[in-house]
Image (spheres, rainbow, N blue to C red):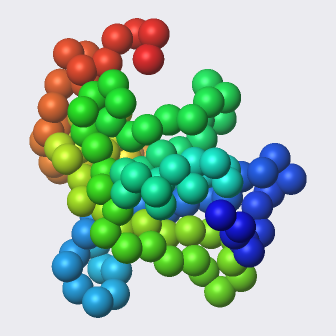
Amino acid sequence: MEFDFKFTSEGLIPVIVQESTGNDRPAGRVLMFAWMNRESLAMTLESGMMTYWSRSRKKLWLKGETSGHTQRVVRWYVDCDKDVLLFEVEQTTGACHTGYESCFFQEMDRDGTPVPVRENKLFDDSSVYSKAT
């Protein structure tokens, strides 16, 4: 596939991932932020399952390959500058490796102080992931 998007000099494009709402336009909770390269984008579109590029591990990463907490693509968008992608997904269990539904569970006050977390974890991260992951 040939993509007319603006990838970074490293060949990556930022991806915002949000829960599926079933509506015509995205309105769900942001679950996570990640990166894709051309190969992970092509794999995602071919399989319908979210695949990313892990900058820390320097390899492709199928969401849920370790945890089973997969993301199925419902629809996707590119922004007006063609330099950011937005995917609306059906998330199995939680998206965050710490056990929460979203990676954005930590609210901050205006002084930058963390507010007590108001939601419960959906799974025990220590039982799902090993230290090597």
Which residue reaches farthest bottom?
24
Q: Judge by depth and name the residue closer to the eye, 124 or 46.
A: 46
Quadrant occupied by the C terminus = top left
Asked if residue 76 lies left or right of residue 1, the reply is left
- Rendered position, 102 above or below 30: above
Residue 13 locus on image (x, y percent): 67, 58
> Is there any visible trace of residue 47 in the rendered image?
yes
Q: Locate residue 3: give its quadrant.
A: bottom right
Q: Residue at x 23, y 85 (%)?
A: 23
Instruction: Say whether residue 117 is left or right of residue 4.
Output: left
* Residue at the right extreme of this rendering: 9
Q: Which of 108 and 28 is in front in this view?
A: 28
Kindly give the residue lying farthest to the top in the view shown: 131
Q: Quadrant of residue 107?
A: bottom left
Residue at horizontal 30 percent and vertical 56 percent from the top: 72
Q: Can residue 116 be seen in this view?
A: no
The residue under the point 62% across, 69% down is 84
> In the rendering, at what x and y percent does residue 14 appear?
62, 58
Q: How many marks?
A: 0
Residue 20 image point, x, y percent:
25, 69
Q: Residue at x 33, y 87 (%)?
A: 25
Q: Position of residue 70 (x, y in %)?
A: 28, 44
Please tell me whether residue 24 is drawn above or below residue 69 in the rendered image: below
* Quarter of the N terminus within the rendering: bottom right
Figure check: 89 above or below 36: below
User: Which residue is more in the foreground, 126 or 40?
Assistant: 40
